[in-house]
Image (cartoon, grey):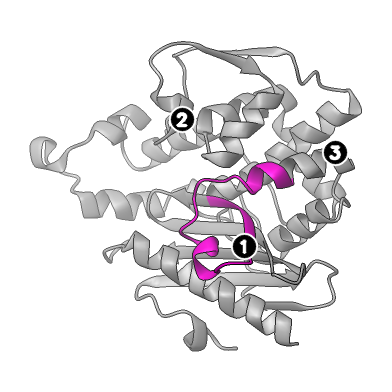
Amino acid sequence: MTWQDVWDVDGVSASWCAAALDGSLVVGYGADELVTPASVMKVQVALTAASLIGSGELDGMARCRLPVQPRTPGPVGLSLMADEVEMSVRDLLVPMLTVSDNVAADALIRIVGLEAVNATTARLGLSRTCITSDLQSMLEEMAREAGFSDYAALAAHDPVADGPPHAAEVRTRLARTSALDPGRGSRTTPREMAELLRGIWTNGAGPPAACARVRSLMARQLTRQRIASGFGIGYTVAAKSGGLMGIVRNEVGVVTDPAGAAYAVAIFTRCDPDLPTDLPAIDTAIGRLARRLVNQLQQT
Protein backbone atom coordinates (compact mmCIF):
# COMPACT_ATOMS: atom_id res chain seq x y z
CA MET A 1 0.00 0.00 0.00
CA THR A 2 1.55 3.30 -1.06
CA TRP A 3 0.84 6.89 -0.09
CA GLN A 4 -0.71 7.63 -3.48
CA ASP A 5 -3.04 4.65 -3.19
CA VAL A 6 -4.80 5.80 -0.05
CA TRP A 7 -4.32 9.52 0.58
CA ASP A 8 -5.26 12.14 -1.99
CA VAL A 9 -6.05 15.36 -0.11
CA ASP A 10 -4.10 18.19 -1.73
CA GLY A 11 -1.93 20.16 0.66
CA VAL A 12 -2.36 17.67 3.49
CA SER A 13 0.23 15.10 4.57
CA ALA A 14 -0.61 12.05 6.63
CA SER A 15 1.05 9.31 8.63
CA TRP A 16 -0.60 6.30 10.16
CA CYS A 17 -0.40 2.94 11.85
CA ALA A 18 -2.97 0.17 12.19
CA ALA A 19 -2.57 -3.08 14.08
CA ALA A 20 -4.52 -6.16 15.05
CA LEU A 21 -5.05 -6.10 18.80
CA ASP A 22 -2.94 -9.22 19.26
CA GLY A 23 -0.02 -7.32 17.71
CA SER A 24 0.58 -9.92 15.03
CA LEU A 25 -0.29 -7.68 12.09
CA VAL A 26 0.81 -4.07 11.63
CA VAL A 27 0.60 -1.71 8.64
CA GLY A 28 1.78 1.85 8.53
CA TYR A 29 3.21 4.81 6.68
CA GLY A 30 5.50 7.16 8.59
CA ALA A 31 4.45 5.16 11.63
CA ASP A 32 7.55 6.16 13.60
CA GLU A 33 7.58 9.83 12.68
CA LEU A 34 6.97 12.31 15.47
CA VAL A 35 3.58 14.01 15.17
CA THR A 36 1.62 16.64 17.10
CA PRO A 37 -1.09 14.78 19.05
CA ALA A 38 -3.45 17.68 19.82
CA SER A 39 -6.41 16.31 21.82
CA VAL A 40 -5.51 12.72 21.08
CA MET A 41 -3.29 13.06 24.15
CA LYS A 42 -6.43 13.05 26.29
CA VAL A 43 -6.38 9.26 26.00
CA GLN A 44 -3.33 8.97 28.27
CA VAL A 45 -4.68 11.64 30.60
CA ALA A 46 -7.85 9.57 30.98
CA LEU A 47 -5.94 6.33 31.45
CA THR A 48 -3.74 7.88 34.13
CA ALA A 49 -6.65 9.36 36.06
CA ALA A 50 -8.76 6.20 35.80
CA SER A 51 -5.82 4.07 36.93
CA LEU A 52 -5.14 6.26 39.98
CA ILE A 53 -8.84 6.17 40.87
CA GLY A 54 -8.87 2.40 40.48
CA SER A 55 -5.82 1.95 42.73
CA GLY A 56 -7.27 4.20 45.42
CA GLU A 57 -4.52 6.80 45.07
CA LEU A 58 -7.05 9.34 43.79
CA ASP A 59 -10.55 9.87 45.15
CA GLY A 60 -12.79 9.75 42.11
CA MET A 61 -15.75 11.12 44.05
CA ALA A 62 -13.87 14.19 45.30
CA ARG A 63 -15.50 17.42 44.16
CA CYS A 64 -13.70 19.62 41.65
CA ARG A 65 -14.70 23.28 41.32
CA LEU A 66 -14.16 24.88 37.93
CA PRO A 67 -14.42 28.67 38.19
CA VAL A 68 -15.21 30.85 35.23
CA GLN A 69 -11.72 32.37 35.32
CA PRO A 70 -9.25 31.11 34.45
CA ARG A 71 -10.95 28.67 32.11
CA THR A 72 -9.19 26.93 29.22
CA PRO A 73 -10.58 28.08 25.86
CA GLY A 74 -12.36 25.56 23.70
CA PRO A 75 -15.13 25.31 21.11
CA VAL A 76 -17.46 23.10 23.16
CA GLY A 77 -18.44 22.06 26.66
CA LEU A 78 -17.38 23.72 29.87
CA SER A 79 -15.46 26.45 28.06
CA LEU A 80 -18.78 27.92 26.94
CA MET A 81 -20.47 27.99 30.33
CA ALA A 82 -21.07 31.32 32.02
CA ASP A 83 -21.09 30.10 35.62
CA GLU A 84 -18.89 28.09 37.93
CA VAL A 85 -19.17 24.33 37.48
CA GLU A 86 -18.65 21.61 40.05
CA MET A 87 -18.38 17.88 39.36
CA SER A 88 -16.60 14.82 40.65
CA VAL A 89 -13.07 14.01 39.56
CA ARG A 90 -14.19 10.79 37.90
CA ASP A 91 -16.89 12.59 35.94
CA LEU A 92 -14.31 14.92 34.40
CA LEU A 93 -13.38 11.99 32.16
CA VAL A 94 -16.82 12.04 30.56
CA PRO A 95 -16.72 15.45 28.81
CA MET A 96 -12.99 15.11 28.14
CA LEU A 97 -13.40 11.96 26.06
CA THR A 98 -16.89 12.38 24.64
CA VAL A 99 -16.71 16.02 23.47
CA SER A 100 -12.96 16.65 23.91
CA ASP A 101 -13.56 19.19 26.66
CA ASN A 102 -10.44 21.29 27.30
CA VAL A 103 -11.48 22.53 30.73
CA ALA A 104 -12.00 18.99 31.99
CA ALA A 105 -8.69 17.89 30.49
CA ASP A 106 -6.72 20.67 32.17
CA ALA A 107 -8.48 20.04 35.48
CA LEU A 108 -7.41 16.39 35.35
CA ILE A 109 -3.87 17.33 34.36
CA ARG A 110 -3.68 19.63 37.38
CA ILE A 111 -5.05 16.92 39.66
CA VAL A 112 -2.83 14.02 38.55
CA GLY A 113 0.17 16.02 37.30
CA LEU A 114 1.93 15.92 33.95
CA GLU A 115 4.65 13.78 35.47
CA ALA A 116 2.15 11.03 36.22
CA VAL A 117 0.68 11.17 32.72
CA ASN A 118 4.10 10.92 31.11
CA ALA A 119 5.06 8.18 33.56
CA THR A 120 2.09 6.18 32.29
CA THR A 121 3.32 6.19 28.71
CA ALA A 122 6.93 5.63 29.80
CA ARG A 123 5.87 2.59 31.83
CA LEU A 124 4.29 1.17 28.69
CA GLY A 125 7.51 1.63 26.74
CA LEU A 126 6.15 4.53 24.68
CA SER A 127 9.39 6.48 24.92
CA ARG A 128 8.60 8.96 22.13
CA THR A 129 5.25 10.04 23.54
CA CYS A 130 5.26 13.06 25.84
CA ILE A 131 2.93 15.88 26.90
CA THR A 132 4.90 19.05 27.55
CA SER A 133 2.21 21.32 29.02
CA ASP A 134 -1.46 21.65 29.83
CA LEU A 135 -3.73 23.02 27.12
CA GLN A 136 -4.17 26.51 28.53
CA SER A 137 -0.41 27.05 28.78
CA MET A 138 0.02 25.70 25.27
CA LEU A 139 -2.58 28.06 23.79
CA GLU A 140 -1.14 31.09 25.59
CA GLU A 141 2.37 30.28 24.39
CA MET A 142 1.13 29.74 20.82
CA ALA A 143 -0.45 33.17 20.84
CA ARG A 144 2.71 34.84 22.12
CA GLU A 145 4.89 33.06 19.57
CA ALA A 146 2.48 34.23 16.86
CA GLY A 147 2.93 37.83 17.95
CA PHE A 148 -0.09 38.40 20.20
CA SER A 149 -0.15 39.42 23.83
CA ASP A 150 -2.20 36.38 24.84
CA TYR A 151 -4.67 33.84 23.48
CA ALA A 152 -7.64 36.15 24.01
CA ALA A 153 -6.01 38.72 21.71
CA LEU A 154 -5.37 36.04 19.09
CA ALA A 155 -8.94 34.77 19.24
CA ALA A 156 -10.34 38.30 19.01
CA HIS A 157 -8.09 39.42 16.14
CA ASP A 158 -10.11 40.50 13.11
CA PRO A 159 -7.82 41.32 10.17
CA VAL A 160 -10.59 43.27 8.42
CA ALA A 161 -11.11 45.59 11.36
CA ASP A 162 -7.69 45.42 12.96
CA GLY A 163 -5.41 45.16 9.95
CA PRO A 164 -2.24 43.03 9.82
CA PRO A 165 -1.38 40.38 10.45
CA HIS A 166 -3.84 39.00 7.95
CA ALA A 167 -5.40 35.57 8.35
CA ALA A 168 -2.88 33.82 6.09
CA GLU A 169 0.04 35.31 8.02
CA VAL A 170 -1.48 34.33 11.37
CA ARG A 171 -1.89 30.77 10.11
CA THR A 172 1.73 30.66 8.94
CA ARG A 173 2.97 32.00 12.28
CA LEU A 174 0.90 29.45 14.20
CA ALA A 175 2.26 26.60 12.10
CA ARG A 176 5.77 27.57 13.22
CA THR A 177 5.03 27.61 16.95
CA SER A 178 6.51 25.06 19.33
CA ALA A 179 3.07 23.57 20.01
CA LEU A 180 2.86 22.52 16.37
CA ASP A 181 6.45 21.29 16.23
CA PRO A 182 6.64 17.75 17.65
CA GLY A 183 10.36 18.25 18.09
CA ARG A 184 9.66 20.92 20.72
CA GLY A 185 6.07 20.50 21.90
CA SER A 186 3.85 17.58 22.86
CA ARG A 187 4.49 14.60 20.65
CA THR A 188 3.83 10.99 19.84
CA THR A 189 4.03 8.62 16.87
CA PRO A 190 1.27 6.73 15.07
CA ARG A 191 2.80 3.42 16.14
CA GLU A 192 2.96 4.39 19.80
CA MET A 193 -0.65 5.56 19.84
CA ALA A 194 -1.75 2.31 18.20
CA GLU A 195 0.25 0.45 20.84
CA LEU A 196 -1.38 2.48 23.62
CA LEU A 197 -4.83 1.59 22.28
CA ARG A 198 -3.84 -2.06 22.05
CA GLY A 199 -2.83 -1.98 25.70
CA ILE A 200 -6.09 -0.34 26.75
CA TRP A 201 -8.20 -2.82 24.81
CA THR A 202 -6.32 -5.86 26.17
CA ASN A 203 -6.10 -4.53 29.75
CA GLY A 204 -2.32 -4.42 29.49
CA ALA A 205 -2.07 -0.65 29.91
CA GLY A 206 -3.53 -0.45 33.39
CA PRO A 207 -6.05 -1.94 35.82
CA PRO A 208 -8.87 -3.70 33.93
CA ALA A 209 -11.52 -1.38 35.38
CA ALA A 210 -9.55 1.70 34.30
CA CYS A 211 -9.05 0.35 30.79
CA ALA A 212 -12.74 -0.52 30.58
CA ARG A 213 -13.70 3.02 31.63
CA VAL A 214 -11.55 4.55 28.89
CA ARG A 215 -12.90 2.12 26.29
CA SER A 216 -16.49 2.86 27.29
CA LEU A 217 -16.09 6.63 27.05
CA MET A 218 -14.17 6.53 23.77
CA ALA A 219 -17.05 4.51 22.34
CA ARG A 220 -19.31 7.44 23.20
CA GLN A 221 -17.27 10.13 21.46
CA LEU A 222 -19.68 12.38 19.57
CA THR A 223 -17.31 12.95 16.65
CA ARG A 224 -18.26 10.29 14.09
CA GLN A 225 -17.14 11.87 10.83
CA ARG A 226 -13.52 10.68 10.86
CA ILE A 227 -12.60 7.01 11.40
CA ALA A 228 -16.20 5.97 11.98
CA SER A 229 -17.30 7.44 8.66
CA GLY A 230 -15.44 4.67 6.85
CA PHE A 231 -17.48 1.86 8.36
CA GLY A 232 -21.04 0.68 8.04
CA ILE A 233 -23.51 -1.55 9.84
CA GLY A 234 -21.96 -4.26 11.96
CA TYR A 235 -18.79 -2.33 12.77
CA THR A 236 -18.23 -0.43 16.00
CA VAL A 237 -15.72 2.38 16.48
CA ALA A 238 -14.38 3.82 19.74
CA ALA A 239 -12.16 6.81 19.08
CA LYS A 240 -10.55 10.04 20.22
CA SER A 241 -10.17 12.92 17.80
CA GLY A 242 -7.70 15.77 17.93
CA GLY A 243 -7.15 19.00 16.04
CA LEU A 244 -5.21 22.20 16.51
CA MET A 245 -5.66 25.54 14.76
CA GLY A 246 -6.76 23.89 11.52
CA ILE A 247 -3.17 22.73 10.98
CA VAL A 248 -3.32 19.23 12.43
CA ARG A 249 -6.36 16.96 12.33
CA ASN A 250 -6.04 13.51 13.87
CA GLU A 251 -7.94 10.55 15.18
CA VAL A 252 -7.07 7.31 16.94
CA GLY A 253 -9.48 4.52 17.66
CA VAL A 254 -10.32 0.85 17.74
CA VAL A 255 -12.51 -0.64 15.02
CA THR A 256 -14.32 -3.90 15.76
CA ASP A 257 -15.68 -5.82 12.78
CA PRO A 258 -18.87 -7.90 12.66
CA ALA A 259 -16.91 -11.05 13.48
CA GLY A 260 -15.53 -9.49 16.66
CA ALA A 261 -11.96 -8.92 15.43
CA ALA A 262 -10.61 -5.55 16.55
CA TYR A 263 -7.97 -3.25 15.11
CA ALA A 264 -6.21 -0.20 16.54
CA VAL A 265 -5.96 2.67 14.07
CA ALA A 266 -3.97 5.90 14.49
CA ILE A 267 -4.08 8.55 11.75
CA PHE A 268 -2.37 11.94 11.96
CA THR A 269 -2.61 14.68 9.33
CA ARG A 270 -0.99 18.06 8.83
CA CYS A 271 -2.16 20.82 6.51
CA ASP A 272 0.04 23.12 4.47
CA PRO A 273 -0.55 26.50 6.17
CA ASP A 274 -0.23 28.28 2.81
CA LEU A 275 -3.17 26.42 1.26
CA PRO A 276 -6.91 26.53 2.03
CA THR A 277 -8.04 23.76 4.35
CA ASP A 278 -11.08 21.62 3.56
CA LEU A 279 -11.73 20.04 6.96
CA PRO A 280 -14.70 17.87 5.86
CA ALA A 281 -12.54 16.46 3.05
CA ILE A 282 -9.84 15.55 5.58
CA ASP A 283 -12.40 13.87 7.83
CA THR A 284 -13.76 11.82 4.95
CA ALA A 285 -10.25 10.87 3.86
CA ILE A 286 -9.43 9.71 7.40
CA GLY A 287 -12.47 7.43 7.35
CA ARG A 288 -11.62 6.12 3.90
CA LEU A 289 -8.02 5.44 4.93
CA ALA A 290 -9.11 3.68 8.12
CA ARG A 291 -11.33 1.36 6.11
CA ARG A 292 -8.48 0.54 3.71
CA LEU A 293 -6.14 -0.20 6.61
CA VAL A 294 -8.62 -2.47 8.37
CA ASN A 295 -9.42 -4.24 5.12
CA GLN A 296 -5.73 -4.90 4.56
CA LEU A 297 -5.33 -6.33 8.05
CA GLN A 298 -8.42 -8.51 7.58
CA GLN A 299 -7.01 -9.95 4.39
CA THR A 300 -3.49 -10.59 5.66
Whether 222 is among the magenta residues is yes
Q: Give how far across and how far down residue 124 sits, in percent.
A: 85, 52
Q: Nearer the viewer, residue 147 or 195?
A: 195
Circle 1 is placed at which residue position?
34
**Cα–Cα span, label 3 and label 1:** 30 Å
Q: Secondary structure at mark 1?
A: loop
User: Comparing marks 1 and 2, which lies closer to the viewer?
Assistant: 2
The amino acid at mark 3 is: Ala
Q: Quadrant of residue 158?
A: top left
Residue under the image location 54 percent in, 62 percent down: 228
Residue under the image location 55 percent in, 69 percent down: 231
**Cα–Cα span, label 1 and label 2:** 29 Å
The amino acid at mark 2 is: Gly
Residue 131 can be seen, yes or no: no
Q: Earlier in the sequence, mark 1 or mark 2?
A: 1
Q: Quadrant of the C terminus?
A: bottom right
Q: Give how far across and how far down residue 263 sits, in percent.
A: 72, 68
**Cα–Cα span, label 2 and label 3:** 26 Å
Is residue 256 positioned above or below 297 on the image?
above
Q: Quadrant of residue 232?
A: bottom right
Q: Is residue 62 left or right of residue 190?
A: right
Circle 3 is placed at which residue position?
209
Q: Earlier in the sequence, mark 3 or mark 1?
A: 1
Q: How dense is the environment of label 2, judged by Cα within 10 Å: few (below 14), some, or many (20 and up)?
A: some
Q: How dense is the environment of label 3, judged by Cα within 10 Å: few (below 14), some, or many (20 and up)?
A: some
